[in-house]
């Protein structure tokens, strides 16, 4: 009934401003024809104590406020005031700084759904007014391409980031709308989008996203407003038909991951963030159009990602040069780029694929990236950020409060702020649980019946999860519990009665008449896993990565009794020891294993040796002490490694 | 007696034009105070049939002529004519093209000592006249920084390659002089050098080599002319005192390997060719000055090279980005850069260190680079060149006839043309043998006594070498035979009588009264060696490189029964089989070993797996067929790898 009402509003083009803003999640798929589910809104999930609690508190209390201060100090807000004043003052920072502020605003906006804060609303309203003052009557707004540079607009789209900034403006506007019902910020972006719709296209002036991002934002704008023209513009951008008109070079087409038809792509190449954002936007576009060519391309790219190009942390982008994907199996550890934004893009893409298909394998990638390659990006205290996320280090400084290109920090902030929106989705027949954490869901089924679910768990430190399911009234529906691919021998009980053994790498579907107080007990065995990479990965051969639940572990120098580079496993036959360390790194489970340390240190031994001599190298027994990867580099700059030599002696 | 005469000429500053040009080798150390030996001239060694014969024939018959045609077709010679004519025509090619022609001229000049060719002399004389016509009265000559760009001379030395081009001009001039006694080309370079000496220096205008090279050339010019001012200018360039006056950035100082005192360097960083050339020049400078700070720095850098940053092929420069050295132990195989010029630089540097110190370890590195990382750079037919020399490949095209930046092809040509000059050196007490090959030395001891040595050997395919030593008259002197570090259990006989067992990694010194017809028999056991890398090398852990004598081997696709990426050793306990294949790749020794090939192919298996599942992967027994690394990619584009997984099952 509620759904019908919304649908009518959408069809009437009048959705915006209506009360359905409260229903819309991180992405809003209630009317999407090719989606298996629709995520619940951010405010529907309250995250309780545990793994994410402290990180999210740090995000709201320190990351978001300190990042605004830094943005302001670097003149990023001033750029808008200068543009509005036409005062000719030089632009502060690189040409894409507007997007950094927008992304920060998006983070702040999402945070309101968990932590309402009138002062923050007021700050966002004031920033919105500042941005509005910089917008031209045409709708164009970009503080870099203004003043003397206004004549160069849309002439250097391969680098201009004009549409990239608009994408982030729209996403910020959508987030603020979905958190408050306030359309002021969204209206600014929409006006710019309307300008593009009016003046650009195959028979008008050519457009190129250059840095893909706007595709996602336009589809979401379509979902928010019901206006098909935005979907059409997204399709035009993805169609990549302007290669000739824009005289794009092959190297640009590779690097930009735009400029040729998305459906012509056969591999992940070029700038990793661009490729992930483009793939996210293409997934959104597919979900609304059902165009099979997109689905085929998405499948091909996803296979390339997961079979050949993804770090075990969910990080992507092997090369610093061009911040790009490497060749197949090119996954260096020490030199890994693994930009935080790229891991976030990977998470966003896989979240979309999950919503569209209902296939658990996408949730695995999403969770892998979230807990590891994304999570490593922000320091435990919430004030330092990684741009690169290497999987081994000899101790360089990787966490900084500010980067001249400060895309990653507010990106990390918006992920943490919107995290509750990734937990659950609804479908016509029930509800899906994607993530586990102490939490309370307060939402409803798609037929309108209220539904509360309270999770109690110490996930990811422990694998038992209790879900108290409380529908408003007894009702038959399906509860789908995600059983991660790593959770072999998981078990589910409902009110103490064992369900059929669920298959790892699937959603365990429990269809029954649910009534208030029903209690589901899920056990995801948290075995420590020793993992191997495909031997074609040059950097990981005969090395072991340690995982437990969704967490990838690493060796960091402060926990070891020998230099990290000298350590190896002493075989894998012995079990890992697990140690709760509430005192360490805001509380972690540490894993220990028998190992060996070369003596004398490998730093003093020759680069090349006959195997017989190499095998005579001596080592002493040591304990290998593993911490979760995300928590490294929180005790100063230290050597670290994820892939630990197996030990050959 | 001869020496005294030369010395007097040098002291009188009248060496140039005198007859000692016939005595000067690749570098000329007869009067160098801090050198253990002095290499014999190129013409003193005639290389007979065997390993290098065909390559050197191809160099003279195909490489040198076809490269000139390509240089000419690309307008590299025309640049000089245009400059001379002041016709305002645009410069052809990148800004350093002059150096490509000079390097080609150097190659052609050295080749005359083995293959005199009046037509080639005439061609070189004509080119010399063309270059002379482009030289300004000041001495300045550079076709890029002429015409409209003349006003920018010496204003962008961090990129201008002005001094780099002069360095190659001087080296070409020296080579032509040493081959013919003709000083015309050398005079052009000398005039430019005189201009620099006059107008630049600490109290005058500042200079920076930008791309080091001129340092070597200036010291050689000093050695050739006896004029101290050139040594002084080299010292000024190496002193790096102009950092502030030139406002050099830290990134430039790293990349350029110049701009700060050479003696302040503690590690090999930045552009690999620049670092190798700078180190070669610094070694030359040390040899003439004895400045202990240089020796200390050279030792530090050499340790960094050989302990942490050199490929097993003698290639250097891990990264494509900046064509640069990587971090310690960063030696990727598939992504290796290993520019041919950098391996040549490594060879040149180690040849210089050997001459200075007499320590065999430098000859090992020189030979490693020569037979592998340099040798791979030119196709067997002499018409295709590698810029990159990776140690693994999935089959990209790495050999091309021409590069827009065509530094490597003529560099490879000058190495092959001058190769006889690397075979022998003399010292006061006798003669040193560095390289083995069918060959005839016709030279003299430093006291003037004529000396012939005829080597008979099939090195590097076989390890027995017979040297017939024929002094002009019976005389007591020391014959030093290089015993490579890999040659364990080598033995030496003189006239059938066994000498004391020589130590691998040393020169076996045989001091006796030598008479005509004395016969030395050297046996260097050619065992196939399985080599391991330091486990800190991320890319080589638990992998085996195969070597035999000075040659590094590899697996190339055409010789295998399964995809190269699927192959591994089936342990190392079985011996290698050796197979003479005169029919293959112009004649090679092939090595075979028991191996295994994953089935199904690793291309179809997951990226990450639990170790237990990974260990259950199946493989079938196969034979691994190794060819010498230098010979790969001569049968089209193929997958290849040097470091082969040990096999863990």
Image: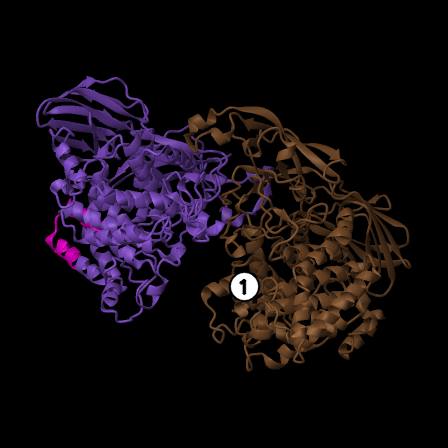
Chain colours: A purple, B brown
Residue denoted by label 1: B257
Q: Residues within 10 Å of mark 1 (few under 14, many from 20)?
A: many
In the depicted view, which residue is nearer to us: A523 or B514? A523
Q: Quadrant of residue A113?
A: top left
Is residue B414 at least partly visible in the picture?
no
Please give the name of the residue rendered at 68% of the width and 59% of the height, measured from the top-left corner: B73
Residue B146 lies, with reference to residue A357, above or below; the image says below
Left or right for B169, reference B250: right
> How far from the left and from the top, in percent, is residue B330?
50, 49
**Does residue B504 appear left or right of residue A261 in this picture?**
right
Q: Nearer the viewer, residue B291 or B457?
A: B457
- State the residue at coordinates (80%, 77%): B8
Q: Is residue B456 above or below residue B574?
A: below
Left or right of residue B188, residue B594 in this image: left
- Give the vertical position of B199 relative to B533 (above or below): below
Q: Does the image show residue A94?
A: yes
Magenta includes A271? no
Q: Nearer the viewer, residue B533 or A100?
A: A100
User: Residue visible at 67% across and 61% down?
Assistant: B352
- Residue B386, given in percent of the width and then of the height, sits at 63, 49
Rendered location of residue A117, percent (x, y): 12, 51
- Secondary structure, mark 1, is loop
Question: What are the residue bounds of the magenta stretch?
Answer: A106-126
Quadrant where the image shows the N terminus of chain B = bottom right
Which x, y percent locates residue B170? 69, 69
Residue positioned most to the left: A473
């Amino acid at each position: 009934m509620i759904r019908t009402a919304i649908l009518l509003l959408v069809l009437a083009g009048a959705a915006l401003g209506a009360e359905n803003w409260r229903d819309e999640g991180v992405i809003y798929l209630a009317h999407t024809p090719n989606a298996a589910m629709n995520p619940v809104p951010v405010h529907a999930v309250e995250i309780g104590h545990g793994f994410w609690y402290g990180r999210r508190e740090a995000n709201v209390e320190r990351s978001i406020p300190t990042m605004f201060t830094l943005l302001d100090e670097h003149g990023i807000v001033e750029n808008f005031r200068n543009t509005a004043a036409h005062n000719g003052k030089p632009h502060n920072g690189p040409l894409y700084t507007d997007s950094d502020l927008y992304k920060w605003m998006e983070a702040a906006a999402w945070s309101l759904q968990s932590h309402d804060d009138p002062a923050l609303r007021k700050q966002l309203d004031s920033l919105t007014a500042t941005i509005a003052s910089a917008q031209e009557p045409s709708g164009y707004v970009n503080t870099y391409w203004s003043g003397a540079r206004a004549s160069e607009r849309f002439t250097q789209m391969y680098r201009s980031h004009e549409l990239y900034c608009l994408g982030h403006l729209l996403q910020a506007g959508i987030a603020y709308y979905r958190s408050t019902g306030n359309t002021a910020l969204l209206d600014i972006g929409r006006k710019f989008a309307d300008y593009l719709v009016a003046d650009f296209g195959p028979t008008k002036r050519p457009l190129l996203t250059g840095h893909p991002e706007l595709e996602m934002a336009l589809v979401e704008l379509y979902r928010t407003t019901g206006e098909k023209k935005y979907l059409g513009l997204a399709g035009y951008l993805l169609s990549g038909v302007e290669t000739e008109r824009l005289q794009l070079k092959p190297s640009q087409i590779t690097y930009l991951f735009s400029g040729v038809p998305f459906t012509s792509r056969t591999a992940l190449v070029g700038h990793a963030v661009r490729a992930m954002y483009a793939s996210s936007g293409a997934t959104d576009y597919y979900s609304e159009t059902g165009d099979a060519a997109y689905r085929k391309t998405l499948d091909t790219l996803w296979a390339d990602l997961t079979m050949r190009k993804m770090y075990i942390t969910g990080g992507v982008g092997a090369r610093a040069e061009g911040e790009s994907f490497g060749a197949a199996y090119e996954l260096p550890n020490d030199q890994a780029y693994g930009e935080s934004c790229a891991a976030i893009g990977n998470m966003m893409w896989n979240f979309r694929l999950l919503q569209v298909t209902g296939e658990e394998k996408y949730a695995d990638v999403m969770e892998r990236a979230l807990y590891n390659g994304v999570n490593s990006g922000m320091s435990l205290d919430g004030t330092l950020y990684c741009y690169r996320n290497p999987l081994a280090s000899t101790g360089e400084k990787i966490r900084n409060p500010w980067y001249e290109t400060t895309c990653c920090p507010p990106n990390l902030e918006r992920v943490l702020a919107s995290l509750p929106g990734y937990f659950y989705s609804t479908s016509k027949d029930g509800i899906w649980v994607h993530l586990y954490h102490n939490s309370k869901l307060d939402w409803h089924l798609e037929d309108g019946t209220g539904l509360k679910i309270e999770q109690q768990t110490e996930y990811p430190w422990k694998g038992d999860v209790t879900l108290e399911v409380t529908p408003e009234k007894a009702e038959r529906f399906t509860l789908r519990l995600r059983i991660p691919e790593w959770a072999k021998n998981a078990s589910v009980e409902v009110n103490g009665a064992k369900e059929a053994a669920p298959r790892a790498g699937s959603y365990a579907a429990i269809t029954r008449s649910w009534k208030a107080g029903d209690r589901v007990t899920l056990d995801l065995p948290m075995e420590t896993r020793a993992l191997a990479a495909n031997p074609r990965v040059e950097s990981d051969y005969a090395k072991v990565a340690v995982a437990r639940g969704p967490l990838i572990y690493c060796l960091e120098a402060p926990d070891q009794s020998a230099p990290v580079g000298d350590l190896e496993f002493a075989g894998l036959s012995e079990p890992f020891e697990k140690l709760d360390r509430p005192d360490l790194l805001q509380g972690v489970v540490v894993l220990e294993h028998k190992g060996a340390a070369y003596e004398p240190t490998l730093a003093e031994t020759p680069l090349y040796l006959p195997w017989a001599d190499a095998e005579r190298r001596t080592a002493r027994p040591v304990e290998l002490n593993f911490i979760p990867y995300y928590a490294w580099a929180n005790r100063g700059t230290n050597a670290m490694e994820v892939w630990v030599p197996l030990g050959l002696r």
